[in-house]
Every structure is written in C-alpha cells, then in structure tokens.
Amino acid sequence: MAGQAILSIHDAYVTFGKKPLFEDLSFNIHERDRICLVGKNGAGKTTLMHMITGERELDGGKRWQLPGITIGYLQQEIHFDLEQTISDYIFSALAKDQQNDEHRYLIEIITEPLELDPNAKMGMLSGGQLRRAALAQALGEEPDMLLRDEPTNHLD
C-alpha cells in the first residue's frame, strides 16, 4: 500500500527552447517510494528532476509538495574548492543553523561507511571518491527525498 503523497505534478507542460519536452505529464510520489528513471541522453531526465526539486518552473500545469518535505539532489556536476576538505565540503551545504558540532559528528558518521577520509582534500580525490563525497553532502542535509542524477557515474 502506498504511503502519503509527498509530491505531485499534474498536467505539466515544459518546453526546451520552443520544442515541447513534456506535455500532459502527471505523476505522484509517495512516502517510501523508490523510483528509477531510465532514458536516453537528452530525453529530459535531468529536467524532470529539476521539476521535482522546484528548480525548474513548469510552463504549464501544477506542482504540489507536502509542506515541510525537504528534497536533496545529487547533481551530475560536482562543484567544489580544490583545497576544501571533504568535511568542509559537506558542512558547506548545510543551513547556517545546522553548522554546529552536532552536525560535524553526523558528517563523521556519514563518511565512514562511504570510505571517505573527512580530512582529505577535494582536489586529491578520484572521480568515484568525488561522487561519494557529493552523496555524503546530500545525505548530510538529511532530506526526506533524495534524487540522484546518474548515481553510478565514476564510482570506484
């Protein structure tokens, strides 16, 4: 049985340039759903994720999100400072009120199973380690929903 709906998109219309990318798109996401989105390059997977996060406005239709729900997003491109430690990279994504010792401890808990040294410099990491650091950053925000765009690219 499906849990409560936490996000809904109804009759979405989205264009890319002048070309319609989505027309009459409707779906619901419920608590505890695990969804895999598969498609060819250029099919609109990342655009759809941006619609879910609210980063991309719909050209038509409605987007509804359960109040209080937070959405984490592991993007394809990872932006970081070469001299930044993994710990500081994760910490930088947290809201100012969460940048405290309690959340530093959380970072240590998250990095250990991902086999990341929190003191390692971001500029010294392999592609797979960078993806794991980005995953740790997304998990550090403790989102209710986590979207991972191309989650297995460059994992080692």
Image (tube, rainbow, N blue to C red):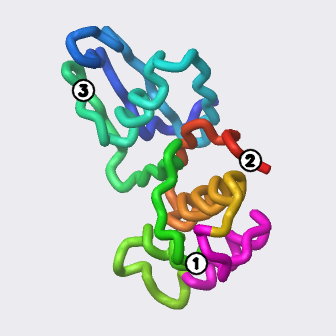
The reply to whether dot 1 and dot 3 touch (C-beta < 8 Å) is no
Q: Which portion, as a residue range, is magenta? A: 104-123
Q: For marks 2 and 3, give the one nearer the viewer.
A: 2
> Which labelled disc corresponds to residue 58?
3
Q: Position of residue 98 (x, y in %)?
A: 43, 79
Q: Secondary structure at mark 3?
A: loop
Q: The disc labelled 2 sits on which kind of residue?
A: Leu
Mark 1–mark 3 Cα distance, whole angstroms, equals 37 Å
Q: Earlier in the sequence, mark 1 or mark 2?
A: 1
Residue 80's place in the image compared with 118, above or below, is above
In this view, the residue in front, 87 or 128, is 128
Q: Is residue 49 left or right of residue 40?
A: left
Q: Is residue 47 left or right of residue 74?
A: left
Identity of the residue drawn at 59% across and 31% down: 2
Q: Secondary structure at mark 2?
A: loop
Residue on which disc 2 sits:
155
